[in-house]
Image (cartoon, rainbow, N blue to C red):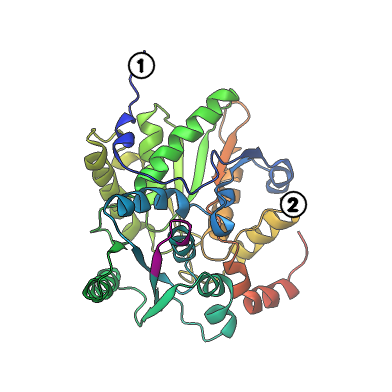
Amino acid sequence: MHQDPLGTLSRYPTVTLSHSPTPLEALPNLSRHAGGANIWIKRDDCTGLALGGNKVRKLEYYVGEARAQGADTLLITGAVQSNYIRMTVAAARRCGMDCHVQLEERVASPDPNYRNSGNVLLDRLMGATIHSYPVGEDEAGADRNLHRIADSLRAQGKSPYVIALGPGGKQLGALGYVHAARELHRQLAGRDLTMDEIVVATGSGQTHAGLLFGLRALGHTLRVTGICVRRNAKLQYPRVRDLFGKISSLLEIASPATEADIHLDDDFLAPGYGKLNPATLRAIQAAAQSEGILTDPVYSGKSMAGLLHRAQALVQTPGPEKNVLFIHTGGAPSIFAYEPELTGALEGSSAV
């Protein structure tokens, strides 16, 4: 019997929060629209918890540790329209816990839709205690302030657990996508299906690094392309690289992923995090109008734009018919926060 190279994952306590395995589906209409490789999709927008998304895989590990430590309150920081915050509040409620969230000013938008609709509305609906942080690009400061809130809660007799998102944190969430790599490996093997490339959004880097680490551990050599959604490739590169080391330490195995495995594309980032651009709008329309797949301006829409580009590039390479896989990380609630911007852009564009 072959030894499981990812067997040490079982050492970590988890809670079941997601509907998994998530579907693996072909997208023939989008493939024809793109005029490139065959496009497939891994539906991590269908993970179930509070409208789904990739963050639930990470939360299964964070909340597992929180419960093992006897925590009664979860704390997390993120953008005003953070999908991670929405899913953390839902996870807390599922597990009978309180939740304090900190909204950072990452996107300068006075629009009331951005401030009150989408994920913010859902956070409030689920009863989160909301705090504000006035800076948008200060991970260390945001995490420090989150710990100050946790200290205040301890003084009140609570037992808080902080999900720190900065690179200095424990990075347990990356294990969720090491596990997802094993899930995907089994799905591909079960259908005798080979992928030539995977495209995924890369922000905190945990999804990207965890998936790549897991695939390499399981013997896959295919390219994994991270589409930058928060910072440029030069800044994102060391973040993903350093996560390999963090995951390696957590699992107590040598990293099977190397610097040469890191492929990043920041062509769809401008004008910056949480801001729409023409390629992203076209990709959002193409996915919606060809397949009924909903993607958002912040994460999945930009990575969809990257997918369409990579699908067209792959078909130019020699060899048999190519397959490219899109990891759909979710984010549909934030579409409503961008209603004025999307409506204005759609009124000036033609249908796909």
| Nearer the observer, 42 or 265 | 42
Q: Secondary structure at mark 2?
A: helix
For label 2, the residue is: 290
Residue 166, label in figure: none
| Nearer the observer, 36 or 193 | 193
Q: Which residues are magenta?
A: 93-99
Residue visible at 41% across and 38% down? Answer: 179
Residue 65 position in % (x across, y down) = 30, 50
Q: Is residue 231 left or right of residue 285?
A: left
Residue visible at 21% across and 41% down? Answer: 249
- Does the magenta segment cover residue 341? no
Residue 38 visible in rendering: no
- Does the magenta segment cover residue 94? yes
Residue visible at 70% across and 75% down? Answer: 343
Residue 14 position in % (x across, y down) = 37, 44
From what the image shows, is residue 90 above or below residue 148? above
Quadrant showing the C terminus: bottom right
Q: Secondary structure at mark 1?
A: loop
Residue 269 position in % (x across, y down) = 48, 64
Question: In terms of image quadrants, where is residue 75?
Answer: bottom left
Q: Is residue 94 left or right of residue 280?
A: left
From what the image shows, is residue 297 above or below residue 207? below
Q: Residues within 10 Å of mark 2 (few under 14, many from 20)?
A: some
Q: Is residue 304 left or right of residue 225?
A: right
Residue visible at 33% across and 35% down? Answer: 10
Residue 6 position in % (x across, y down) = 34, 31
Q: Name the residue furthest front.
A: 157
Question: In terms of image quadrants, where is residue 11?
Answer: top left
For label 1, the residue is: 2
